[in-house]
């Protein structure tokens, strides 16, 4: 049979064939026995993902979960979707390969602080830089769980762990800062213990086109129990968390009497009950600010004394994605140069017939 | 630095811990590593001990970083070590090729596990090819020592540093998850008993009186590169002449020779005893250095015995070297377990018995 030897992408993979069905959370569960330690924060993240998955505009058959190695990387086994349990640190690169080979797929990465930020730091920043349409869910428990409790790149300086028995002398990464600095176009933070918020963040990430990173504070109750207690416990949460909402002032505290204002580029904590400042003086969050400077300042709060920890979307901006650009470029080149013909190429130039 | 003398002492220790303790006693200046099962105890033991003893330890961001820190520290003249397990050792191969090319000493410990890929966390010997044939790109070899006990996990650290510094070449200690995790009695060597060598090549600063030193593995001129290749080859030839180590057990009158390294050598030794109790003349040849390989000993015994049974925890890797060594003088059969499964002495015995029987049948039949 004659053919032009034109290599076409496998159109049939990932395209929707059945009629749309209304799925439920259960449909996204693989039914496999979940093997995280009892009480691990990963269970909640899995539950929120399974609850949110039917609600977002992603056909179930197009959803892919890619992971590296670590406790969080067991995630793909538990989702009734295509999965990829990859190589330690390489999830972002593997996911980039999946996405570029089949841009129709909705590619999600389940990864941890060791996987994404230690060994995988390089791939992470480059995925962000390319703005590949990937959703990266970073389960940050500030410890290496799978290898039984060594300090990670997000562990606090001075932390005592199995590999830092006298206290860690490494400065930690602030993942949100790294993502922003690397050019990620959607950067958010949530918690395993805040199910509604986590669901909302996932839904927003699903809508976004480009690299989306959600840092999820996750409790490892075996090796780093209580790392986020001050953010999750009822009596402490209000005083220690500020929710970022687009167009709204940075207001927090049990009586909503505390706020943050920007004095130039310096954030300041203000007590509204003192009468010196009112709500109208506060920093109004703009998640679509094209200048990442303010989002970056927000990302520094976690290391600033007395400042609350921001949860929500730090930044969501529109930029062309690598996967869309590459298709566009191919179309453009083909328009000017025509579609390649392998057979013609093979029979061109220095060829001759043996007679 | 204060020189503590702890003396020789006998302790009950895990293989990984005995190895880590011995690295401190051998005067290691620096350790770089990344957690991976089943060898994280090495990193943990060192981070616990080193601040109050001597040396330094750094938990790197990956095995790639660790081996490059080794490259740097070895270049600066330090006695350095890293350790990992199979997938992490794969990540170090690029660095090892460069370190071998730049002729720097270091010790790399592989507490190996089942593969390929992420595999299992159970013991395996599937990294024999990688360890003995170079592992990274280009013509080079590591010196490979294969311990079979906690005692050797300890002793081979001293031998490893000694050999690495003598040849300015990386040394690999190829162990496995079982040896790393098992507890045995170990007689520890004296602290500071391993003298430091002069390293005139080390990057230690350049006073006016000293020529500058650039550590590199790049030699664009092909003739020069070939010359360096010859120099490396000459080192490997010398190793083959004087560094081969092996152990023989009941080989004097052996008709069936078992071969195995590391954990398998222990299993085989047990199987030899069981076979001898049944009147089968079995013996064992255990390579201790996997590179340089005890080729001559296999060649000699290959002429003496009727058949060799090679036992490995892999799909059959060392067997290729055994076959090359005996060069057709006797058949070489194989018993292998993979994926983290350890063969039992009884199943080795069963195979030996079957082999003995068929030998006998053949002999009486013809
Ligand atoms: S070790 Fe920690 S992170 Fe891992 S499953 Fe157990 S609780 Fe969860």
Image: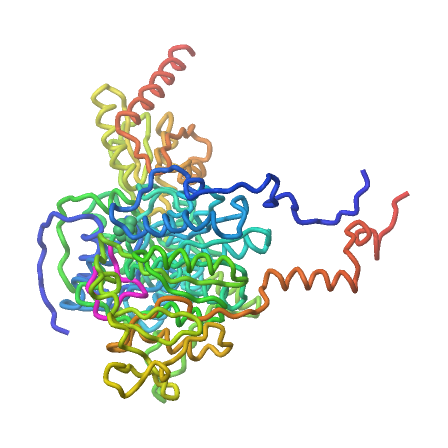
Q: Is residue B77 above or below residue B251?
A: below
Is residue A149 left or right of B113 when viewed as pictured?
A: left
Which residue is nearer to you in this view: A262 or A324?
A262
Residue B140 magenta-drawn?
no
State the quadrant of the C terminus of chain B: top left
Coordinates of residue B53 in the picture (x, y in percent): 14, 67
Q: Is residue B343 above or below residue B15?
A: above
Residue A160 magenta-drawn?
yes
**Residue placed at 47% from the left, 60% from the top?**
A205
**Residue placed at 70% from the left, 61% from the top?**
A330
Is residue B331 left or right of B346 when viewed as pictured?
A: right
Task: Give the farthest residue toward the right.
Answer: A355
**Is residue A323 something that shows in the picture?**
yes
Count of marks placed on residues: 0
**Residue placed at 25% from the left, 48% from the top?**
A39
Coordinates of residue A319 in the picture (x, y in percent): 57, 69
**Residue placed at 33% from the left, 23% from the top?**
B351
Coordinates of residue B197 in the picture (x, y in percent): 26, 69
Which residue is nearer to you in this view: A130 or B4?
A130
Dominant SS type (magenta): loop
Q: Is residue B126 above or below residue B271?
A: below
Coordinates of residue B239 in the picture (x, y in percent): 36, 54
State the quadrant of the N terminus of chain B: bottom left
Q: Which residues are magenta?
A: A149-161
Which residue is nearer to you in this view: A162 or A225?
A225
């Amino acid at each position: 049979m004659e053919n032009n030897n034109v290599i076409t992408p496998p159109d049939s993979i990932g395209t929707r064939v059945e009629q749309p069905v209304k799925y439920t959370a259960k449909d996204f569960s693989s039914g496999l026995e979940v093997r995280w330690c009892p009480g691990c924060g990963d269970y909640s993240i899995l539950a929120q993902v399974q609850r949110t998955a039917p609600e977002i505009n992603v056909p179930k058959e197009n959803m892919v979960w890619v992971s590296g190695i670590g406790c969080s990387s067991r995630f793909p086994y538990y989702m009734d979707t295509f999965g990829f349990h990859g190589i330690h640190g390489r999830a972002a690169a593997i996911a980039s390969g999946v996405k570029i080979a089949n841009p129709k797929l909705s590619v999600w990465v389940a990864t941890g602080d060791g996987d994404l930020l230690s060994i995988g730091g390089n791939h992470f920043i480059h995925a962000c830089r390319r703005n590949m349409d990937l959703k990266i869910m970073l389960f940050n428990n500030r410890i290496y769980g799978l290898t039984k409790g060594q300090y990670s790149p997000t562990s606090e300086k001075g932390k005592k762990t199995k590999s830092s028995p006298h206290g860690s002398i490494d400065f930690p990464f602030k993942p949100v800062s790294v993502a922003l600095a690397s050019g990620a176009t959607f950067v958010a933070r949530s918690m395993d213990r805040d199910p509604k918020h986590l669901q909302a963040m996932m839904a927003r990430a699903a809508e976004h086109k480009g690299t989306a990173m959600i840092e999820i504070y996750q409790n490892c109750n075996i090796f780093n129990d209580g790392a986020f207690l001050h953010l999750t416990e009822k009596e402490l949460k209000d005083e220690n968390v500020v929710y970022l909402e687009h167009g709204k002032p940075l207001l927090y505290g049990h009586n909503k009497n505390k706020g943050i204002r920007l004095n130039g580029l310096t954030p300041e904590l203000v007590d509204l009950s003192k009468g010196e400042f009112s709500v109208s003086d506060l920093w109004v969050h703009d998640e679509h600010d094209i200048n990442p400077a303010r989002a970056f300042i927000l990302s520094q709060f976690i290391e600033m004394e007395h400042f609350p920890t921001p949860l929500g979307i730090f930044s969501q901006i529109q930029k062309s994605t690598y996967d869309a650009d590459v298709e566009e470029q191919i179309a453009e080149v083909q328009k000017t140069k025509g579609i390649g013909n392998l057979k013609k190429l093979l029979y061109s130039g220095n060829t001759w017939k043996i007679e | 630095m204060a020189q503590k003398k702890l003396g020789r002492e006998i302790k009950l220790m895990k293989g990984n811990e005995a190895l880590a303790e011995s690295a401190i006693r051998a005067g290691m200046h620096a350790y770089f590593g990344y957690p991976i099962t089943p060898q994280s105890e090495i990193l943990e033991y060192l981070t616990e001990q080193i601040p109050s003893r001597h040396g330094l330890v750094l938990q790197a961001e990956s095995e790639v970083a660790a081996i490059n820190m080794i490259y740097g520290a070895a270049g600066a003249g330090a006695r350095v070590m890293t350790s990992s397990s199979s997938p992490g050792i794969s990540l170090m191969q690029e660095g090892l090729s460069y370190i071998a090319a730049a002729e720097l000493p270091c010790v790399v410990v592989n507490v190996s596990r089942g593969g390929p890929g992420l595999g299992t966390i159970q013991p395996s010997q599937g990294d024999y090819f990688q360890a003995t044939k170079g592992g990274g790109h280009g013509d080079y070899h590591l010196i490979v020592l294969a311990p079979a006990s906690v005692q050797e996990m300890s002793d081979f650290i001293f031998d490893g540093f000694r050999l690495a510094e003598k040849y300015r070449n990386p040394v690999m200690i190829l162990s496995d998850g079982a040896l790393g995790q098992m507890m045995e009695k170990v007689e520890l060597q004296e602290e500071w008993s391993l003298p430091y060598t002069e390293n005139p090549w080390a990057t230690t600063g350049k006073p006016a009186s000293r020529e500058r030193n650039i550590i590199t593995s790049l030699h664009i001129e092909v003739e020069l590169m070939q010359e360096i290749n010859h120099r490396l080859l000459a080192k490997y030839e010398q190793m083959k002449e004087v560094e081969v180590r092996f152990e023989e057990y009941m080989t004097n009158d052996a008709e069936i020779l078992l071969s195995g390294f590391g954990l398998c050598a222990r299993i085989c030794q047990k199987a030899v005893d069981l076979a001898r109790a049944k009147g089968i003349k079995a013996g064992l040849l255990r390579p201790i250095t996997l590179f340089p390989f005890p080729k001559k000993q296999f060649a000699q015994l290959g002429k003496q015995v009727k058949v060799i049974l090679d036992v490995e925890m892999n799909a059959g890797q060392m067997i290729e070297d055994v076959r090359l060594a005996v060069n057709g003088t006797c058949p070489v059969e194989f018993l292998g377990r993979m994926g983290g499964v350890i063969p039992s002495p009884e199943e080795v015995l069963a195979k030996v018995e079957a082999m003995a029987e068929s030998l006998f049948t053949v002999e009486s039949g013809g």
